[in-house]
Structures are given as structure tokens and as C-alpha cells.
Amino acid sequence: MTIDFILNGEDVLVKTEAERRLIDILRGSFSLLGAKAGCLTGSCGACSVIFNGMVTQACLIPAFRIRGSEIITIEGFSLTDEYQDIVRGFFNAGIENCGYCDTGKIFAVEALLSRNLQPTRGEALAAFNGIKCRCTEPEKLADAVMAIADKRQRRSYGRGA
Ligand code: FES
Ligand code: FES
């Protein structure tokens, strides 16, 4: 089947089998390698993308569901101020990344802050429940999220960034 959708702001077409996973389409047909094929069962977060406005695991989306959809991968998201704030926030909190779950961690923060600009520390910690990260202490992640949230609030309210 041939499927059309919007990928990082561009209209694209792909020929594929109906059951092929979105993660395999992104990596295999578009050479977008930022989303990783990790567990392939929806439990590690490494394959996260924004699918029709929601952070979603690309390993759980079959090709037939993507027709007409809008997908933003980490490559597209990296062009935004929000991405830059998250990455800078991780750096400032001393978070080291091995690269395996960066995409999952970044989109976990985006999923939280896009619906809740003033998370509690508990909510910040819970945002990473779906991410399997063996490199980062949860407390450092929470520190980073609180600082990133503060920055985004200031940006939203026009008090500078
Ligand atoms: S590869 Fe999709 S959640 Fe792990
Ligand atoms: S940064 Fe290494 S597994 Fe998360």
C-alpha cells in the first residue's frame, strides 16, 4: 500500500506493508535514526515521536494508522526552542547521555510540559516512568524538569528566556 502523511512538516509518501511499524518506516524508509528500535513492546520510550500532537511510541503504530497523520520526529523537534530548552536543562543538571534513550527522555519532558507548565516534583519524576534509562539518576531528571518548566513559563509569559 502507498501511504501519505506529513513528516516533520513535509508531505511524504511511502510504499509499505500495512502492518509495518512506524519506527521501521522512519528508520528504514526515511533514514531518520533519532528514534531507536529498543524493546519494540511500548515499554522503553526509545522510539518516541509526536503523532498527531501526542507523544507516542512509534513501535506501536502500524503503517495503516499513519495515513493522513502528522508526525514529528526528534529531528524535526530539534529545530524548536522547546527542544533547545530541554537539552540545555539536561546539560545544566549534569545529566549524561549515552544516546540510547535521549529521544525518549526529551519527549517525556515535552509530553509533560505540553499539558502541565507547572508540574510538581512528583509529576516531574513520574514523567519518566515509561523510559528505561540506565545512565541517569531520577533526582537529576526531576531537577532538570523543574528548571526547564520554569524557563518555559517565562518564555510563555513573555518575560524573556
Ligand atoms: S522501542 Fe518502542 S517503546 Fe521501546
Ligand atoms: S542515557 Fe543511557 S540509557 Fe538513558
Image (cartoon, rainbow, N blue to C red):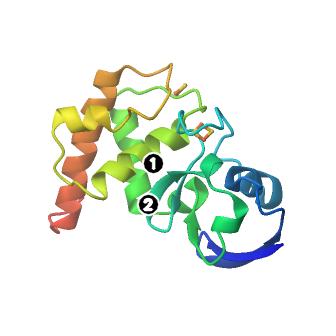
Look at discs 1 and 2 and give the one toward the viewer: 2
Q: Quadrant of ligand 1?
A: top right
Is 14 left or right of 112, judged from the image as shown?
right
Is 22 left or right of 110, judged from the image as shown?
right
Q: Position of residue 37 (x, y in %)?
A: 69, 39
* Local crowd size for mark 1, using a 10 Å CA cut-off: few (<14), some (14–19), many (≥20): many
- Asked which secondary structure carries label 1, the reply is helix
Q: Which residue is mark 2?
A: 54
Amino acid at the residue labelled 2: Met
| Location of residue 39 by image quarter | top right
Query: Residue at image x 16%, y 50%?
Result: 118
Q: Position of residue 31 (x, y in %)?
A: 78, 55
Q: Which residue is mark 1?
A: 107
Is 12 left or right of 119, judged from the image as shown?
right
Q: Position of residue 157 (x, y in %)?
A: 15, 67
Query: Residue at image x 14%, y 64%?
Result: 159
Query: Residue at image x 15%, y 39%?
Result: 120
- Asked which secondary structure carries label 2, the reply is strand
Q: Is residue 14 above or below residue 161?
A: below
Q: Is residue 49 above or below residue 141?
A: below
Q: Which mark is residue 52?
A: none
Label 1 – label 2 distance at C-alpha: 10 Å
Query: Residue at image x 50%, y 27%?
Result: 132
Amino acid at the residue labelled 1: Phe
